[in-house]
Image (tube, coloured by chain):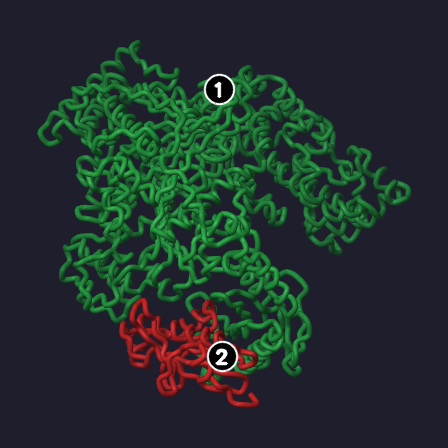
Amino acid sequence: MKTVSYDAAAKLLDLSRRIGSPERGREQLEGAVALHNILCRQGVAYLADEVGMGKTYVALATVALFRHFTPSFRVLVIAPRENIQRKWVKELGNFVAHNVRFPDLRVKGLDGAPVRGAVICDGLAEFLREVTLDPDRDFFLRLTSFSIGLSIGDESSWRHWRKSVMQGLPWLPKQALDLRGAGDKQGFKENIARAINCAMPTFDLVVVDEGHNLKHGFARPVAARNRVLGLMLGHADDETDRRWFPEYGPRARRVLLLSATPIEDSYRHLYGQLDVVGKADRFRDLADPAAVPEARRETAGRFLVRRVTTIAAGGEKLSKNLYRREWRRGGVADHDVPIGFDADARQRLVVALVQKKVSELLGSEKFGAAFQIGMLASFESFLETAKVRSVDDEGNFDDAEQTDDEGEREGIDVGAVNGLAASYRRKFGAELPHPKMDALVCRLARAWNDGRKALVFVRRVASVVELKRKLDRAYDAWLRERLERELPAQVQGRLTRLWSDYHQAREARMQTTAQIRDATAAESISDTAGEEVKDAVRRGRRPADADHGGTDTFFAWFFRGEGPKGVLSGARLQQRFGEAHSALSTFFEDNHAAWLLGVRPGEVLAGLAGRMGCDQAEASRRLGERAVRYVSSAKPGRGDWFEAAQAGALELLRERDGEIGTRAAAVLLHRYPRAASAGRLGASFDAASWIETPTFFSELRRRESLRTALWPAPSDGRGTFDDQFREQELRARLVAGMSRLGHASIDLYICLIRGIGSLAAGAQAEQDESGLPQIEAWLDELERLQRTSVAQRGWRAFDELAEAARNFDLILDVNLPGARTVKLAEAARKIGTLLGKQQPIGPMVGGVNQTLVRQFRMPGYPLVLLTTDVLQEGEDLHTFCSDVYHYGIAWTPSSMEQRTGRIDRVRSQTDRRLAGLTGPVCGEDKLQVFYPHLQDTVEVLQVQKVLWRMNEFLRLMHRDLVIPAAEQRKLDVGREVVLGRGYPEPITTALETAFEVTEEMRAGDRGAAEVDGAAGYVARRRFEALRAPLPGLSIAWEEQGFDGYLVGTAAVGVRQQPFFLGLRSVGEHLVLRCVSPVGRIGWERALPPDSAAALAASESMGVRLGAVAHAQRRSHDLTVEDDVLLGAEEHDAARAAAIIARVVREADRLERALLPGKDQPLDDFRKDLVRETAGD
Amino acid sequence: MTEPFDWRGYTRAAGLEMDGDSIVVRFQERGRHQRVGVVEVEDGLVVRSIAARGKAWREAELDPMLLRQRNRSLDLVGLHVDDRDRLVAQAWLPALGITPEEFAVYVRTVAAEADRLEFWLTGADVE
């Protein structure tokens, strides 16, 4: 396969779009060219760019380069886990839409979408099924799927696997997956892999994301997962029985591995990864301990590329090690000052006692003075820990694969700590104090006042719950103090009772939760359990998932969900904004008519009359007539009247000439798309008074400074008026949503309650009909906050809203990428969903909660995100967070780097902050990396060990190589104490990669001239030309609505037959496809004989029938479809006419035969066609 | 069609292998082969290859309706069970202006899909 030059790649791809940095885009593209060319020459390549540099995009660009020149190029992507697997597919769509310069019909279709279908497989069985069904798609697997679950003693899982594999390969001899050998789990799993190998096509490229997960290689003993993957890809293997697996062989022509941390502290980890994917033969010296380090590095340099990122700050370029500040001494309050607890005798005694117990354990024969790094429970908390039940149990710590030893997975000190904790609780009636946890909670609790987000990684699963509980209490204390200080005196008595109610509700909830847990564990529901418990257990063993607020914090109980009954809670106030009859229903609206007319509310009718050239009475009459047609509610309220008046006024303005007419039309189209009708009222209403309603946004326009900070007007240079209006509206929805639903809602609540003066359920503000005083009060409060510093008054509504406003584009890019293009109402709904169910402290354990992840990528709640390794890879959390805490330390440098990398990425908060500096960089400006631990405990040894290894990793991957020690996941306490290496100092010289892109990698055979940028446009022109009259056909074409497709209705005698045409490519050739829907019919076996005969007759003529199955296969939508190569352009019309005639004729014939009496028009199929042509 | 289409001449011109009235397509990577027939119809040609006999696809418990689902994602080739109970891959092509290279694309596409199905259902290389 030919190599490509940078110029050729640049003609096809533009990677700077959306990241906004031409330099970064060039760097990414250069990487893609290098990888392409390495893959051509070596068959394997490794992209080891630092975290956050966009490896996914570089890999996608590499694939695009191959596929553009070889359209049949087959790709398999293996992601580490499900969330990243789905992210790949999402990014593929984004990449093709934005970074491929033109539709080449190989990578990018005429509709802007990927030409090849993408298949996300939830497991190997599904992969087998899909790959046999249609191998010519892009497949996305996840590494966890290669860990095949089989239970010894439970044959059902074995049977299930055998059945799945035999369905995919019906001819496979049963002996290949012999159940009589149950017990040989490894052999059974490996034969599953060999069987799948037989069914797989050969992939031109296999991409392994986070390839370091395979570092332990293929040779036994190693995780079964690596063996299964290796055998599936056809690892050369003497044990394969060719009688059973006749076509077993290599299925990966090329392999691209991705990881920012390809090794831990030895190049042999690279060999291990290459060995799994069958590409190690040519790089054996990587695993040769006799080879000199320089030679091994040179070998790695033949296929590995790594670029380091820098941030320009204060006139310097800082590499990662220089713009990060590590807190290596364990403290969290002052840099490099350890956690201190000398003043508290009880804490000191408890720590000493626990250390004594741990020392005794480590001194026992069983553990030999060694323990798994990060897997001592006492390092994280002293709370009682559940016992690990079996080998297949996840264990008490994340990354359970670190050890197979049941005792170690449980935590060797769990028993001792549990005993101490129980004894302490009996004696003192409280939980054991834990100085490290307490110090961390104290530090994190600053967030309510400074708004600084924190990402906290723990190892021990239970620590998430325990930390959250402590932080929730700290948050409650802060919130109570605020409400007591800031709410008016007359509501304080009621507030005190509410706190009491909340404590009772929380207590009751905790008991309920405990009962649910017990009932679930016992697999039975006690007769004494309350109805709520029974109901919750029946409905999937947990309470309903709707936002009922909850009792985690007072915020959740009082400000979210329904809120407590009988009181004007934050939740109740929030609801009023959305109720059409409420006085607050227009609060967060915008008076668009006033804005377009350039007047204030109160002057709108006059302005309208002036534009219409009539007096105000006439304008009022006509406005009423128009507006009433927009009232759709049977019982309209304030919000309905206001909206109808706005729409009526805009309709009148739309009829004016010039700019205002055009703009009114656009606003009407985007913001009030509901078509006017006769209306329910049948008569006019007083729209003239409603059109004068002031709103938050109409009044914000008058406060220039505040507006600039919270709701900046889109600049004129940003697209058309439509684009600018949409942005203005999206910004408004974001401000409104954040004000009502998050941290800012506390300020808003306090402000409005001050005006109302009561917490009584039905209390309203005494004010005029306009609602202006409440709006003014809120704007005054925001202005007051704007004038004062965060240090003076804490992090408040203004800060949250202003931060969102400053970073509006970033928020949309990371959280709402489709919001710029979908309908405004849909975008507003998405924003509402994004901001719903906010909580100050977010827990993440077991799986990825995407809502929480997206909210963490915003200013505001959650301010603290507590997580196990579920967020170690894949999710970007960098946009508003600069602090990462390794509360539970991972045992490998790669895991530590991956975790820190979540907040260290392109466009990170740190990036923005440092780039904005004009003076020298100080420690506080940097990205903060904490390693909380206690001095004078064995924990200090493990932290030091990991820090040494992290330094070694840096030295191996960059210049100034040192020879590292062998990898040890266990820590030998005696050895470490004797060695006494202490803390390694951070490396303070700028990092330079040891694996740069060389000239040879950049050089390529194919120049820019070989990229035919016009081919796509020519194809589109030829395709569009088919709208012209075609010989022998009468066709009515649809004018719009189907991007990249031609949709029409052909006359078949006196009947009609809808169809659509699509253009794609097969190899070098253009292919025109024609699809015509027949209609919905019953499943084949249920069809009467004459219908079945009609279908068979069509097929015997060479006609291709298609089916889209419906639920339970009771029916399906039948289509007739066929395609034809488009060769020389002069034959296009004739070939198109031939294929259309053939397809519509057969479709109509089948409709007559199968659905007598019907002649369905295109409208009957319109929804399906829209869905299909949109690629759904 | 006004006059017979010289598909044998196209076969030779495209460098494809003839065996009697069939075209034989060989797949080097896995050492397999597939036999393809050509039938002239009113508005062009139909290129056809047998993937499996009735006994074979029935033993594999293949639901023929799945073939119609599969047809939706196939390019240039369709699948069905013919009147002799055989699972067949076939393509229709217009004779107008077709080149030997284009003819070969259809033949190879039909052969590849039939061979893939044959291996999936039988593990053998008979057709």
Residue A706 in view of the camera: yes
Q: Which of A1034 and B109 is in front in this view?
A: B109
Is A604 left, or right, of A42 in this rendering? right
Q: What element carries label 1?
A: loop
What is the number of the mark on residue A861? none
Given the image, on which type of amino acid does mark 2 rest?
Trp
For disc 2, the chain is B
Q: Mark 1 points at which residue?
A: A921
Q: Is residue A247 left or right of residue A333?
A: left
Q: Nearer the viewer, residue B3 or A760?
A: B3
Residue A1107 against residue A28 in the figure, above or below: below
Q: Is the C-beta separation of discs 1 and 2 under 8 Å?
A: no
The quadrant the N terminus of chain A occupies is bottom left
Q: Where is residue A831? Give x, y as percent.
A: 56, 41
- Residue A1020 position (above or below residue A974): below
Say few, some or many: other residues with alpha carbon within 10 Å of mark 2 (under 14 / 14 to 19 / 20 or more): many
Q: Which residue is drawn at 57% across and 90% down?
A: B2
Secondary structure state at the residue bearing disc 2:
strand
Residue A542 visible to the viewer: no
Q: Image quarter for residue A76? A: bottom left
Locate residue B86, reporting x and y percent: 36, 82
Q: In the rendered picture, chain B carries what hue?
A: red
Can you tell which chain is drawn green?
A: A
Please state the horizontal and vertical placement of residue A1145, each as a whole percent of the image: 58, 81
Dot 1 and dot 2 within a common chain: no
Dot 1 alpha-carbon crowd within 10 angstroms: few under 14, some 14 to 19, many 20 or more: some
For residue A621, side relative to residue A405 (left or right): right
Q: Which chain carries label 1?
A: A
Mark 1 and mark 2: Cα distance apart in space: 70 Å
Which residue was labeled with disc 2?
B92
